[in-house]
Amino acid sequence: MGLLSRVFGSRPDESSVTHAVGDAVAALTGVSSHSLTYHHQQYGGGSLHGVVDVADSPTFLAVLRTAVATLADVLGDDVDRVTFYLSGRTPDGEPVLPGDLGTSQPPLGRELRARLAP
């Protein structure tokens, strides 16, 4: 996906992107619930917002990897311009942020793909 697809509106709708990411994240071991929402941005890739209830920090790291991989499948290289406004919440109520795992806050997909590559 690129500039022409954004100009001519051939990007997948926000709802289908939200569901794809939500389904992938919900399938992870250690994720008990989530509230995720994806939004397109006019001149950018988009933004992913939400909170994911996770067992621990490593599970939140798996959430980030899964979200990036799913968005790459759906959006192609546009994932590099997606801003991730995600946080995790552990069972004791403690927040886990991407910045806690060594990324900028909020990170872009480009950074997450580079840092979280297997």
Image (spheres, helix red, strand yellow):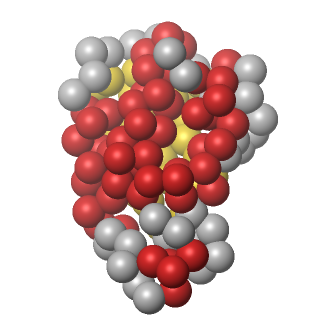
Where residue 76 appears, as percent x and y from the top left, is: 44, 54
41 up-or-down from 27: above or below = below
The residue positioned 41% from the left and 48% from the top of the image is 71
Where residue 99 appears, as percent x and y from the top left, is: 72, 28
Whether residue 48 appears in this view of the structure is yes
Left or right of residue 40, residue 71 in this image: left
Whether residue 92 appears in this view of the structure is no
The residue positioned 32% from the left and 69% from the top of the image is 12
The residue positioned 53% from the left and 58% from the top of the image is 78
Where residue 89 appears, as percent x and y from the top left, is: 49, 26
The residue positioned 47% from the left and 28% from the top of the image is 65
Image quadrant in which you'd find residue 25:
top left
Where residue 83 appears, as percent x and y from the top left, is: 63, 52
Q: State the residue in front, 5 or 112.
A: 5
Numbered circles on residues, count: 0
8 up-or-down from 92: above or below = below
42 up-or-down from 48: above or below = below
